Amino acid sequence: GPAVELSPRGYGCGSANSHCSSEATESISRTHSYRKARPASVSSSGFHSQRRRLTYSQPSSIDSLETFNGDMTRKSEKEILQALNDRFAGYIDKVRNLEMHNRNLEAEAAALRQNQAGRASVGEHYERELGDLRGLLQQLTGEKARAAVEHEHLEEDIQHLRVRLEDEARNREELEAAARAMKKYVEECRLVRLELDKKLRALDEEAAFLKKNHEEEVAELLEQIQSAQVSFDMRDTLKADVTTALREIRSQLDSHASKTSVHAEEWFKVRMEHLSEAARSNQDAIRGTQEEIAEYRRQLQSRTIELETLRGTKESLERQRIEKKAEMMFTFVLQETINQLDNELKTTKWEMASQLKDYQELLNVKMALDIEIAAYRKLLEGEENRFVSGGGPYSYLESRISAHLKVKGEEISDTIHIHTYGPFRITS
């Protein structure tokens, strides 16, 4: 707080054996100067030091005092007393005004204390909330980093799955082309089989027809031989050589027929074997083709299932990507909110610092006013005691109190001169 310097109080007269005059003269001078200052120049202490200087003025000699006392009249004494009373009343009003101003300052200080306490609680609440948000931000930052890494892995998996999907699509197209070619080949084999079946039926019919003709020819030849033999028997006696010739012819015909029959049977057997082998080879080819088609169908079904699985995985990864994007947007919004709260906290701290500064200035003003009021009260009590006692030598006292106030950017300079003669005090 500001310091008040008081010179030692003293009362003096011109000589040790002389008495001071009971009449007093008044010299009053009061100066008020107000100077506007910048808001940034508000002093932290609020006031400069107050100084009270008490100076002593002694009469040059006892003769001059006696001459001065002889010139004073009762009328001037009444005027001086009236002026002193007016000054005293003005001083009392000023003290009351200062006390009222002091009470107002105390109320403002209490309000500032409450506001400071509220701001402190709000600041603590902001600090806690900001700490929670920072912790959440760190957690979200970690999750964001993990999500970014997971997103990169998912992108790689998606790229790998796309490559596999393209490969499987190409394989599927190749398998479908192969299946179409095999279907065409199977159709051709079926047509060949039908043609071979037709040829086989034609050959069977031809073999049956040839066998029937052969049997008819053999039967006809046997009948001819039997008829010829009967006729030859009747003519035994006449034609003995004809029988021998017929036997030879018969043996030749039998050998020729047996050779023809054996040759036909062998030809038919060879033909049947060739046709059977062709049919078996065609059946094996058809069976192999059918098995290959079934294998292709199984592979196509498995590829289709795998393709559906890859599509499901792709959709799941796409949903995860959208969710991660939403989380990143939420993290961005949360970061913006945290930055806004940081700015509000900084603004609140700045306002609290400004209010604390104003409060300190008001407190300094209050302390300075308290000191000034105490000094006034002390002077008033001392003068009242001297006025009541009325004893002792008269003295001339000049008290000068200077106070430089600087409140909210406005500097006030106030100088008070107090001239005292004996029991009377004049304040200016």
Image (cartoon, rainbow, N blue to C red):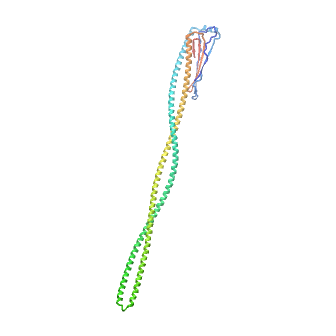
Judge whether residue 33 can be spotted in this image.
no
The percent coordinates of residue 233 (x first, y second) are: 35, 89
Farthest residue to the right: give it: 60
The percent coordinates of residue 5 (x first, y second) are: 60, 20
Q: Is residue 423 above or below residue 38?
A: above
What residue is drawn where x is 48% and y is 59%?
173
Q: Is residue 351 above or below residue 97?
A: below
Q: Is residue 182 above or below residue 408?
A: below
Q: Nearer the viewer, residue 44 or 225?
A: 225
Q: Nearer the viewer, residue 107 or 71?
A: 107
The quarter of the rendered structure image containing the N terminus is top right
Q: Nearer the viewer, residue 162 or 345?
A: 162
Q: Nearer the viewer, residue 350 or 302?
A: 302
Find residue 215 and report its image quarter.
bottom left
What residue is drawn where x is 47% and y is 49%?
316
Q: Is residue 199 left or right of residue 161?
A: left
What residue is drawn where x is 44% and y is 65%?
287
Q: Is residue 411 above or below residue 380?
A: below
